Amino acid sequence: MMDAVRQWAFSLCAAAMACAVIELLLPSISLAKMTRLVLSVFFLCVLIQPLGLEAHRSEISLKTGQGMEQAEEYAAEISGRIGEDLSGSVRSAVEEELALIGLSPAEYELEIGLGSEQILVTVLLPKDSTADPAEISDCLEQDPMIQTNVIKEEAE
């Protein structure tokens, strides 16, 4: 509250000084009366500014709150889209790496989880797979942002 009063008082002083300087520089011409009227209205507006703001303060805060809700919705939507794009990119990169060691997409299933600090890649191998889980894990963990979990189904 005191900050608002202090800011209002500063605005008053600044407006008064600006009006005084303009009036001193004003030559005595036919527009002098009109200029003084404009300066007076300007100073009056600065003087009653807090009253006008107080009347609209609740409306402004309501609109600000609605704007924040909409911004949060947009942020969530953008975050979801970024997550989908990142997941697709990681999937493609992992499939390329696995193709380099001789695994085709038909030989495994991929699950990709996006954490706050790391990307969790789970490779599910069928029980009849001849692929070495350690080799797959070593191949994929070259990137420090990727945590790999290779799971081979157990024979029943």
Image (cartoon, rainbow, N blue to C red):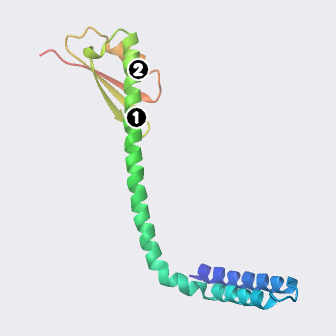
Q: Which residue is mark 2?
A: 140
Residue closest to the eye, 30 or 48: 30
| Up-down relation of residue 59 to residue 152 (above or below) | below
Which residue appears at 47% of the width and 74% of the height? 60
Is there any visible trace of residue 138 in the rendered image?
no
> Outermost residue toward the front?
30
| Up-down relation of residue 138 to residue 81 (above or below) | above
Q: Secondary structure at mark 2?
A: helix
Q: Secondary structure at mark 1?
A: helix
Q: Is residue 107 left or right of residue 76?
A: left
Q: Is residue 100 left or right of residue 111?
A: right
Which kind of residue does numbered mark 1 sit on? Asp
State which tag comes first along the sequence, 1 or 2. Answer: 1
- Circles 1 and 2 in contact, beta carbons < 8 Å: no
Q: How far across and how far down the image is residue 155, in percent?
A: 15, 14
Q: How far across and how far down the image is residue 68, in percent?
A: 43, 62
For the C terminus, the quadrant is top left
Which residue appears at 85% of the width and 84% of the height? 26
Q: Which residue is mark 1?
A: 85
Is there any visible trace of residue 71 in the rendered image?
yes
Q: How far across and how far down the image is residue 133, in percent?
A: 32, 15
